Amino acid sequence: EVLFEGRTVRLVSPETIKERQAQLKQAPAAPKPAAEVGAARQGLFDVLRELRRTLAAEINKPAYVVFSDATLTDMAARMPLSEGEFLDVHGVGEHKAKRYAKPFLAAIQRWVAEQGAR
């Protein structure tokens, strides 16, 4: 592109690169989903992870295609019991809610009933 189309080339000095790297190190970290899974909710996280594995196997896809670990962590922390609450979970959009809300909400409701928690 530079040779045949006349595009210009921009060079960046090593000092500029070092300054930019220093700025990035000082920048605040991105916000995390609601919370990390506490010991009390680790059991729910494990149930959700197993459900994710089963659903992924049914569609012959890797588990992260269904939901990421961050999404399962947020789901275990929030424990949504309705589709509206499910949509508030980090990483859940309309498409995934339509596809996966019922099995995940059912699993959460079972876990809550068994543990007597919420």
Image: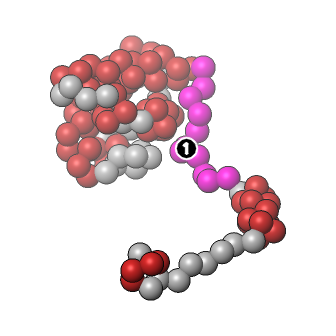
Between residues 56 and 82, which one lies in front from this camera angle?
A: 56
Q: Horizontally, is 107 left or right of 91 in the view?
A: left
Q: Where is 64 relative to 88, above or below?
A: above
* Residue 110, horizontal then vertical, whole percent: 32, 20
Q: Horizontally, is 2 left or right of 59 in the view?
A: right
> Residue at position x 60%, y 20% from top?
39
Dominant secondary structure of the residues highlighted in magenta in the image: loop
Q: Where is 46 relative to 35, above or below?
A: above
Element marked by disc 1 = loop
**Magenta stretch, residue numbers:** 29-39
The quarter of the picture where residue 97 lies is: top left
Q: Residue furthest front?
A: 3
> Residue at position x 31%, y 51% from top?
93
> Residue at position x 44%, y 18% from top?
46
> Residue at position x 20%, y 44% from top?
98
* Residue 112, horizontal then vertical, whole percent: 40, 22
Residue bearing the label numbered 1: 34
* Residue 8, horizontal then vertical, whole percent: 53, 83
Q: Where is 42 relative to 15, above or below?
A: above
Q: Where is 117 relative to 19, above or below?
A: above
Figure coloring: secondary structure
Q: Label 1 is placed on what type of residue?
A: Ala
Q: Horizontally, is 25 left or right of 64 in the view?
A: right
